[in-house]
Image: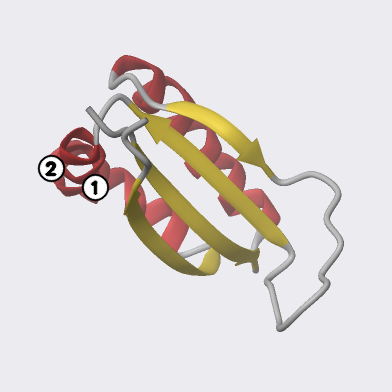
């Protein structure tokens, strides 16, 4: 079964408020089998434009990645992120090797 990924490219506009989202999302993802692959860090933009923060979260399946995003709990917690950042957010199916 192919894994699923949240691929997020964001700019934090309110660092103090964003800390509240981080406090929510880390345990939430762990409880839902989400695992950070990339969470910020050094980057070199070699083509196009990319926001300052790139985040990739892996789930056991694409279906689970979608289900977790659409869950009532995440939709509520996501409001913390929306108020503290702007983002491009995609849910992507990985390769089924």
- Which residue lies at the image location 86% right of the left edge and 49% below the top edge? 42
Q: Is residue 18 above or below residue 2?
A: below
- Which residue lies at the image location 37% right of the left edge and 41% below the top edge? 95
Q: Which residue is mark 1?
A: 76
Q: Which image quadrant: the N terminus?
A: top left
- Viewer-closest of 92 and 10: 92
| Residue 50 numbered tag | none
| Residue 72 numbered tag | 2
- Which residue lies at the image location 38% right of the left edge and 26% below the top edge? 34
Q: Position of residue 46 (x, y in %)?
A: 83, 72
Q: Is residue 41 above or below residue 48?
A: above
Q: Position of residue 36 (x, y in %)?
A: 54, 30
Secondary element type, mark 1: helix
- Viewer-closest of 38 and 2: 2
Badge 2: residue crowd in 10 Å (few <14, some 14–19, many ≥20): few
Q: Mark 1 near mark 2, Cβ–Cβ under 8 Å?
A: yes
Of all residues shown, which one is farthest toward the bottom?
Answer: 48
Quadrant of the rendered image containing residue 10: bottom right
């Amino acid at each position: 079964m192919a894994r699923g990924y949240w691929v997020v490219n964001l700019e934090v506009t309110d660092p103090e408020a964003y800390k509240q989202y981080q406090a929510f999302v880390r345990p939430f993802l762990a409880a839902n089998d989400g695992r950070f692959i990339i969470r910020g860090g050094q980057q070199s933009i070699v083509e196009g434009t990319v926001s300052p923060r790139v985040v990739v979260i892996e789930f056991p399946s694409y279906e689970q990645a979608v289900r977790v995003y659409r869950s009532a709990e995440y939709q509520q917690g996501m409001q913390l992120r929306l108020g503290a950042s702007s983002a491009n957010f995609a849910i992507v199916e990985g390769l089924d090797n």
